[in-house]
Image (tube, helix red, strand yellow):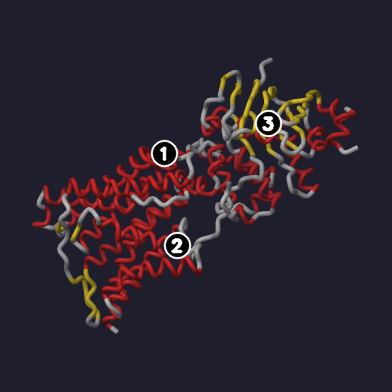
């Protein structure tokens, strides 16, 4: 029983991270109806940004809260800027061309970031320095609740709460929803579609930046290709929840994290990565719209 | 007197289809002008070109300022708002959020609230449904949302595309009364696109008749209503 609860805790904390990244996929899809394959590579760049910051100031030697937040801030900022730039340089000129062009471009940008990363950061994995000292926060009946899990969960919940406030209560957030529901009419009402799209990329990429630091602390091995697997899993989480749906992305992320943890705990850890693809296949066959997704009518 | 809105020699192409072939029309301050014609005559295309949704050749001017090169979202700021064909409400947003989107270009809360209250006095039904998702409303109610949303932009010229489409006759009459009321009360200029020619002519000052991308006839609405060829082609007897 204790072991089970331990797995649940681990699963939720990993699921929260998947959710953060899945939100980026789903938001961009909601607005532009395409998958930004470069999203997970933005996350990789965020991880390296905070890695170099930590190395430069030798943060790993004296972990402290303030450093953690500075790293988080830097990673978020770098990712936001990168997401903004990618949209502006690579995707915007293709806005009026067929969807396939922009999709292929996204794969191109993804490959570009991965291999540019190998060139700049080197191919060897780097050790992400501990920004905080890991400790047992409390234990109940033999279950150790680690401070890191609580921090990951806390920061993720906070980020999602802020996102929710922005999307549902801010003017630009409402404009985002309007654009995703009917962009032609939104433009007629004075909403600048370009601004809304930029905003969406900034928001989604910021979440990837937060996830980057959290993952770095949990699995402190980072390398330029790290986005690939993470991206696939977060993408599956987004599809599982229903692509385009924000609550769906969170739900999908949590299911993903929990089921992976159960596979590792009770089956075999080698099946862990196969699971996400299995889920994707099952979802695409039986419920392509995902758990919380709605069927949208493709307009010509 | 200069017109508030003027279109000169407007051309629109959809691929190889020449949809508008030199449309010219004027709307003066305080006028209701209707654009009538059969399906596919280019009425909606004219409004889409006006709002900058489709690219066009020719000249569009608002208060003598040329606007044809401006992107859609900037035209609203010059006083041109549209209630589009098919209503185009945001289905997953509440009635109130839909109206707020109409006031997107403004940030003066007080005036926005006043405008919203004004819409609610025009359409009390919307007040009852203010927190309901717009996608769950009936066609007539969605039309009310679309018109109110355009009003929230405080237009000088209101563009209405087929406000009667698919609605029960009683609701159509109600909506036309409100259009007339807006015009009289707020001195708002209105360009109305309609297939329901009889209704449109009854409520307009002037009208233009469109046929396959061209204006074929124009004049006072009352004259057109009694014109023989119009009666035969558009009024059904």
Q: Give the labeled residue for mark 3.
A: B186
Disc 2 vs disc 1: which is toward the camera?
1
Label drawn at residue A92: 1
The residue nearer to you, when weighing A44 against A166, is: A44
Q: Return the residue nearer the eye: A58 or B130.
A: A58
x and y percentages locating residue A275 in the rendered image:
35, 71
Residue at (53, 38) in percent of width and height: A187
Mark 2 or mark 1, which has the lower sequence index? 1
Q: Nearer the viewer, mark 3 or mark 1?
A: 1
Q: Position of residue B219 (x, y in %)?
A: 80, 23
Q: Position of residue A95 (x, y in %)?
A: 46, 40
Q: Chain of mark 1?
A: A
From this viewpoint, is residue A197 visible? yes
Note whether A145 is above or below A32 in the view shown. Answer: below
Q: Residue A248: give its label.
A: 2
Which secondary structure lies at badge 2? helix
Q: Quadrant of the image for the N terminus of chain A?
A: bottom left
């Amino acid at each position: 029983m204790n072991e089970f609860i331990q797995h649940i805790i681990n699963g939720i904390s990993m699921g929260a991270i998947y959710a953060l990244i899945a939100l980026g996929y789903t938001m961009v899809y909601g607005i532009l109806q395409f998958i930004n394959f470069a999203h997970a590579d933005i996350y990789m760049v965020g991880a390296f940004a905070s890695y170099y910051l930590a190395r430069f100031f030798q943060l790993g030697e004296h972990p402290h809260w303030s450093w953690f937040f500075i790293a988080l801030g830097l990673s978020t900022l770098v990712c936001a800027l990168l997401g903004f730039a990618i949209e502006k340089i690579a995707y915007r000129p293709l806005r009026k061309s067929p969807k396939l062009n922009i999709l292929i471009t996204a794969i191109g940008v993804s490959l570009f970031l991965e291999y540019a990363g190998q060139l700049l950061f080197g191919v060897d994995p780097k050790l992400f320095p501990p920004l905080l000292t890991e400790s047992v926060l409390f234990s109940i009946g033999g279950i150790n609740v680690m401070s890191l899990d609580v921090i990951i969960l806390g920061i993720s919940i906070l980020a999602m709460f802020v996102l929710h406030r922005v999307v549902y209560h801010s003017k630009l957030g409402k404009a985002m929803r309007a654009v995703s529901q009917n962009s032609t009419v939104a433009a007629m009402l004075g909403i600048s579609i370009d601004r809304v799209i930029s905003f969406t990329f900034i928001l989604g990429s910021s979440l990837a930046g937060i996830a980057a630091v959290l993952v770095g602390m949990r699995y402190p091995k980072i390398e330029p290709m790290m986005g690939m697997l993470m991206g696939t899993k977060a993408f599956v989480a987004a599809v599982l929840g229903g692509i385009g749906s924000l609550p769906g992305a969170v739900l999908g992320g949590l299911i993903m994290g929990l089921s992976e943890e159960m596979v590792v705990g009770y089956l075999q850890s080698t099946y862990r990565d196969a699971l996400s693809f299995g889920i994707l296949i099952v979802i695409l066959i039986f419920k392509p719209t995902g758990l919380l997704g709605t069927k949208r009518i493709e307009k010509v | 007197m200069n017109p508030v809105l003027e279109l000169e020699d407007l051309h629109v192409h959809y691929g190889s289809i020449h949809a508008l072939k030199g449309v010219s029309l004027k709307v003066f301050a305080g006028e209701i002008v209707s654009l009538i014609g059969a399906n596919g005559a280019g009425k909606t295309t004219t409004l889409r070109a006006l709002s900058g949704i489709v690219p066009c050749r020719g000249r569009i001017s608002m208060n003598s300022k040329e606007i044809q090169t401006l992107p859609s979202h900037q035209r609203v700021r010059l006083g041109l708002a549209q209630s589009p064909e098919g209503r185009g409400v945001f289905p997953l947003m509440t009635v109130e959020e839909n109206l707020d989107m109409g006031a997107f270009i403004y940030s003066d809360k007080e005036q926005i609230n006043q405008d919203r209250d004004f819409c609610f006095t025009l359409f009390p039904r919307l007040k009852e449904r203010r927190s309901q998702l717009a996608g769950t409303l009936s066609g007539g109610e969605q039309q009310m949302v679309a018109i109110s949303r355009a009003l929230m932009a405080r237009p000088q010229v209101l563009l209405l595309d087929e406000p009667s489409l698919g609605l029960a006759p009683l609701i159509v009459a109600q909506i036309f009364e409100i259009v007339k009321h807006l015009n009289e009360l707020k001195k708002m200029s209105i360009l109305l696109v309609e297939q329901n020619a009889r209704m449109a002519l009854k409520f307009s000052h002037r009208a233009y008749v469109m046929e396959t991308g061209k204006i074929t006839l124009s004049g006072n609405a009352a004259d057109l209503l009694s014109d023989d060829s119009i009666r035969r082609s558009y009024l059904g007897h």
